[in-house]
Image (cartoon, grey):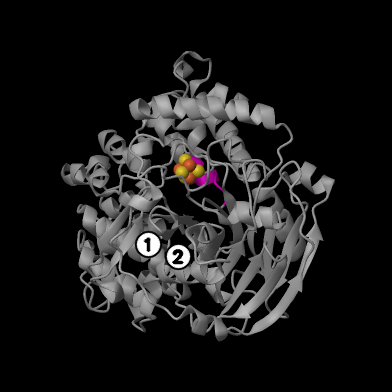
Amino acid sequence: MVEGQIAVEEYKTENTEHTWDLKKIQSAHKILKKILYKKGQVTKGYADRTLYVNLSNNEISEKPVTDEMKKKFTGGRGFGLKLMWDSCKPSTRWDSPENELLITTGPLCGTTQYAGSGKSLCLSVSPSTNIICDCNVGGFFGPYMKFAGFDALEIQGKATKDVIVVIDGEKGSVSIETAPLEETNTHLLAEQLTRMYASEDTEKSRQKVSVVSSGLAAEHSFWGCLNFSFYDIRRKVPRIKQAGRGGLGTVLRDKKIKAVVVKVERFDGVSNHPADPVALAKVGTKLHKEIRDLDRYQCNMRAVGTGHLVEIMDAYDLLPTENYRFGSFPKASKIYSPKFYELFTKIIPDGCWYGCTMACSKTVDGYTVMTGPYKGQKVTVDGPEYETIGACSNMSLWDPLWILEFNFYCDTYGIDTISAGTSIAFYMEMYEYGILNKERCDGLELCFGNADAALELLHRIARGDSGEFIIVAAKGARRVKDWINQHGWGDKHLVEDTGMESKGLEFSEYVTKESLAMQGGYGLTLKGPQHDEAWLIFMDMVNNAIPTFQMKAEALHYFPMWRTWFGLNGLCKLPWNDVEPADNAQTSEPSKVPEHVQN
Ligand code: SF4
């Protein structure tokens, strides 16, 4: 056992326990359609078929993955775009029945020998932008879906009542079932369905189930996220990772899907049957060793997760504060990573898929909820990740406990912490200017730093409150700008400039005033201002690795293509560049981390 690790039998969270009658809840299911399929084997990273589900007519069918499809589109985001191209029309909008929700995997997804190989890609036409949005996400769902027999899941149509889609890789069946009695919010629903669909009442069986869900707020807002579960046998809870951006959870709930469940029969380190397992194991071992030896000196992500960025961003004037007005703040040290380290449960490994030595998925267990419907209950809070902490600094929230509160409710209500935080920060700045006020905000005093008001806004969105502001606020910064302008409140240009959105999607959490490269990255990213295609701020502002205009232009050409490669293959980007080989600085192009590109 690794030093510092707690044995499975030694740990128990103090979380509030639930005593549901799961048999009764499940007996209320009505099976609308069920098919049996022939189980197959994954070959060189592909199951060689995709699964199609139409909720309008309860069709369930398989589609082949051809060699041409693999050659042209690779997998992941590529497969998702191909399937959407085949099925959607130019007139398709986010809530059209033919809009699809896709969960896809790439050929490397499901590998356990190389760190970060569990990513799924999710795609749909976004409610925020009405263009296609893709998100990558960890958790067990993608690999399990592949081992159950499918490279992608394509859901079209809309159900008339709440349903769940169940892919049972043990029995070789797929079903659409009504699910009237289950909870909707993720922290409860994921636990109910994990226990319900586990073959036996054991931790090992629960570990073979993964659930995709959203929550009540996703039904009323454009910020809906998809939560992907991964069962943690030490904590004995399903934990979650988010496909956060663009409102894909809103699409899930618009289709009346409560959850998608996958169950895998068995899997091991070679279930992905890679083309060259010896080479994979060799580079994997080298990378594991590098992360284990160097992370503590370079990032310390194995201890504190992505939150290590907070102090760096603050030091370089890049941490968004008070709706991006400032890049650093005197109170920022209150939310530096050591503050969260004190709260994290120190159990390793904390990977969101097997074999990830980076293990950055941190968690706070036994957190006592301070507000809302779960007030007083003890829960597990996943994260907070850097982006969530940045969303809170943007609202001028400097108490780690309030950040956990915001993080917990965003997750369980199924909303994206980035879009919610950036939008609320904008509403707060409008409030400071007097363009919004208590009356216009349905009684909320949305000034900077008012955590109570920010949380109350989330609760009212989740409840489906009928206040005019609550309804429009839940649709994000773009719609609130239009609403303010329609009322003729304040200076139109000020309102337009203050709300940090582009194409309808809110900016992620970096101050880009002095980084032309990052601004370019935000501008060129297809789905809107998100950093996954071109996260250039660190190399531009912290490392000063691309100082000339030509170098920035080349980075804006190279990195979006290179980073997209991860989305085609099902790999996490963090193990590529967050920990670098010891001699990386001596290479000709350190920002590309050539040795890892070679891997
Ligand atoms: S680096 Fe973090 S997010 Fe990426 S796969 Fe590993 S644990 Fe998951």
Pinpoint residue 481: horizontal percent, then vertical percent. 39, 66
- Which residue bears the numbered disc 2? 223
**With respect to residue 276, does 498 lie above or below?**
below
User: Is disc 2 surrounded by few (<14), some (14 to 19) or many (20+) residues within 10 Å?
Assistant: many
Pinpoint residue 188: horizontal percent, then vertical percent. 41, 71
Front residue (pair 506, 238): 238
Residue 17 within the segment the image draws in magenta: no
Mark 1: amino acid = Ala
Q: Residue at x 71, y 38 (%)?
A: 274
Q: Is residue 573 left or right of residue 327?
A: right
**Residue range of the region highlighted in magenta in the rendering:** 520-526
Q: Secondary structure at mark 1?
A: helix
Pinpoint residue 97: horizontal percent, then vertical percent. 66, 75
Front residue (pair 489, 336): 336
- Which residue bears the numbered disc 1? 420
Which picture quadrant has residue 83? bottom right
> Assess mark 1: CB under 8 A from ligand 1?
no
| Dot placed on the residue nearer the N-terminal end, 2 or 1 | 2
Q: Is residue 531 visible?
A: no
Q: Secondary structure at mark 2?
A: loop
